[in-house]
Amino acid sequence: MPENVETGNGRTRNRWGEGERLRGEILEAAGRLLAELGGEDGLTIRGVARAVGIAPASIYQHFSDRAELVRGLLDHEFARLAESMRAAEESLGETDVVGRVRAQIRAYCAFAMRNPGHYRLMLANGTSGIEPGTRPKGPLLDVVDRLTAGFERCVEAGHELRVTPGRAAAVVFVGAHGRVALFHGALNRTGAELVEPFVDELVSLVFV
């Protein structure tokens, strides 16, 4: 296997077989640009290539066009969100079922507040088109499903809810989103600590 070599722009070229690492670098750079731009409109293959330090042709080896790059970025960001929520939940003991739900929604809001450009893109592409009478699908619905499972564990542990676990998850998710949107839009503020007291109270309100 050949050793790493320097490219003309000073960047170390990946060894053969390290294409996945380059793909990750491309997505990380696209994410940084998205944060700087505040939205996907200005995101271009050439701009991402410049940020990574590679030729645009190298990106086309991993993403056929800009639309596929954006889809790859969405998958990357939703994976980051899911990992953040999982880590927050598992930071507490299994018996603290209410605390684990609260930790998950806090992690969701923290991600959204820290990454407004990413969040807007994810929110706009978080569900798939559906046939009438069928349940929506998509990574945002996966977030609601995670919260639903958390509330179900609360009920199993003896914590009574005012509504069903699914409805509780929807109420908390929609309420948290509204709070985040308020700070992003009208107030133009992004600190996660701004929404934590609100979401804590929101979680408490769905319990009897």
Image (cartoon, rainbow, N blue to C red):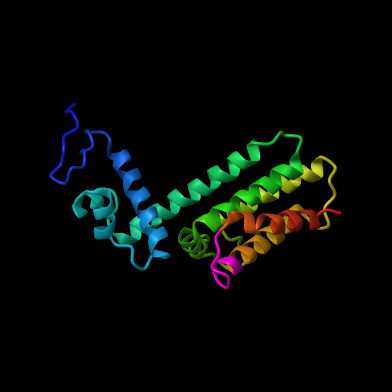
In the rendered image, the residue lying farthest to the top is 1
In the displayed structure image, the side of residue 63 where residue 195 appears, left or right: right
Q: Position of residue 104 (x, y in %)?
A: 64, 47
Question: Where, by quadrant of the figure, is residue 184 drawn?
Answer: bottom right
Q: Position of residue 108 (x, y in %)?
A: 59, 52
Q: Is residue 149 visible?
A: no
The residue lying toward the viewer, choosing from 208 and 50, is 50
Question: Where, by quadrant of the figure, is residue 84 drawn?
Answer: top right
The residue drawn where x is 15% and y is 42% is: 7
In the displayed structure image, the side of residue 24 where residue 14 appears, left or right: left
Q: Position of residue 141 (x, y in %)?
A: 59, 56
Which region of the structure is painted magenta? 182-190
Q: Is residue 163 above or below residue 132?
A: above
Q: Is residue 89 above or below residue 65?
A: above
The residue drawn where x is 55% and y is 71% is: 185
The residue drawn where x is 33% and y is 45% is: 25
Q: Is residue 32 visible?
A: yes
Quadrant of the snapshot with the C terminus: bottom right
Membership of 174 in magenta stretch: no
Q: Main secondary structure of the magenta part?
A: loop
The residue drawn where x is 66% and y is 63% is: 174
Membership of 189 in magenta stretch: yes
Q: Position of residue 125 (x, y in %)?
A: 48, 62
Quadrant of the snapshot with the N terminus: top left
Query: How many dots with numbers?
Result: 0
The residue lying toward the viewer, choosing from 159 and 115, is 115
In the rendered image, the residue lying farthest to the left is 8
In the rendered image, the residue lying farthest to the bottom is 186
